[in-house]
Amino acid sequence: MSILIAMSGGVDSSVSAYLCSLGHDVCRGATMLLWGESCVNADEAAGVCGALGIEHEVLDCRKVFAERVIKNFVKVYESGGTPNPCVECNRFLKFGEFLRHAESCRVERIATGHYARIEHSPSGRYLLRKGKDISRDQSYVLYVLTQEQLSRTEFPLGGMTKPEVRDLAKSLGLINANRQDSQDICFVPDGDYAGFIEAYTGKTYPPGKFVDTAGKVLGTHRGIIHYTAGQRRGLGVAAKSRLYVCSLDAEDGTITLASEGEERLYSRGVVVRGVNLTAFDEVPENFRGGVKIRYRQREVACVVNQSGSDELVIEFAEKQKCPAIGQSAVIYDGEYVIGGGTIVGTI
């Protein structure tokens, strides 16, 4: 069986390539060029592939990345939301363009270095399961994978922990065994999202009013793209208690702030669209499970109902602080992903 491994130049994809080279007759590596004029990581990936004795190629995906990921990133911030570019990159690039390239090369399967697991159930469905290393689990950003994509994908690291991966890389003498993991969005390595948006669009975003939940003006903000729901730091507003960004109105440029104990700061649930379901064709009525509304946020108990072919209503067992429009809500049943969608509203 033939396989194409997505090679980022990091230790995870490198160990994945090694494991795949043991289990497949034909194994190749490919690095996607997503942003910028060159890809330093591609050199490391090529070096690893050379050491493993497998072919390596670079795929220029910058046009699709700009159209599908960066434009959406900018649009969501401009509308007062909080985008999730890693989800969109998985949807359109890593399991979209990459899989199409594999098909064009008549390669049967693809593999990535994600920490998650895929199981083929007796019912015939492919199920997405959390990785063994819960501290590294990436199932949240993979909920968009379709049955077709899951059926042709392998996650070699799903049953491993990060220390085990690094130890194996060291034993193999891989050049990136001690390389630090990237913590930022790949096209905004300094973390200055607003600065990136201004440079990318060539636009300036006007200041506006900070108001409290009663409508009283508290100060002036720097422009709506500088803020996100739930933000506490960097507001520049003096107050007796901590203030959080409660809501953002892109039309009039007003940002509402609320204090820690205010009811307005919390929501009893969210409405999501852009739904992808992994475990079912349709969510059973009053389905009880867990949900994550941000990647690093803890999972909370919830009840889910499908209100339309592309809409879910998710009610939390306990109110949650500032769910952000544009983020993903991903539903779990224990270790298994049920599905999810993009948050479009709160209840």
Image (cartoon, rainbow, N blue to C red):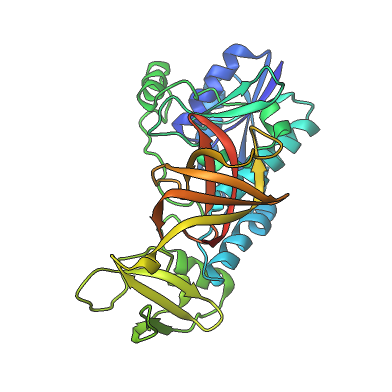
**152 in relation to 244, above or below:** above
Tell which of 109 and 40 is nearer to you: 109
> Is residue 118 at least partly visible in the picture?
yes
Does 331 appear above or below 336? below
**Of all residues shown, which one is farthest toward the left?**
240
Asked whether 100 or 224 is in front, the reply is 224
In-front residue for pair 320/14: 320
Asked if one can make out residue 152 in the rendered structure from this viewpoint, the answer is: no
Toward the viewer: 8 or 273? Answer: 273
Find residue 137 and report its image quarter. top left
Side of 147 where 203 appears, left or right: left
Q: Quadrant of the N terminus?
A: top right
Q: Whole-percent x and y of residue 60?
A: 67, 46
At a point 52% along the width and 38% down the height, the residue shown is 288
- The residue at 47%/52% (across/down) is 185
Residue 4 percent location from the top left of the image: 66, 27
User: Which residue lies most toward the bottom here?
Assistant: 217
Farthest residue, direction front: 286
**Position of residue 184 measured from the top left corner of the image (x, y, whole percent):** 43, 51
Q: Is residue 112 above or below residue 262?
A: above
Instruction: Give above or below for 183 relative to 217.
Output: above
Count of numbered circles in the view: 0
* Residue at x 40%, y 46% (from the top left corner): 296
Q: Which residue lies at the image location 44% right of the left edge and 21% below the top edge? A: 160
* Residue 109: % across, % down: 70, 25
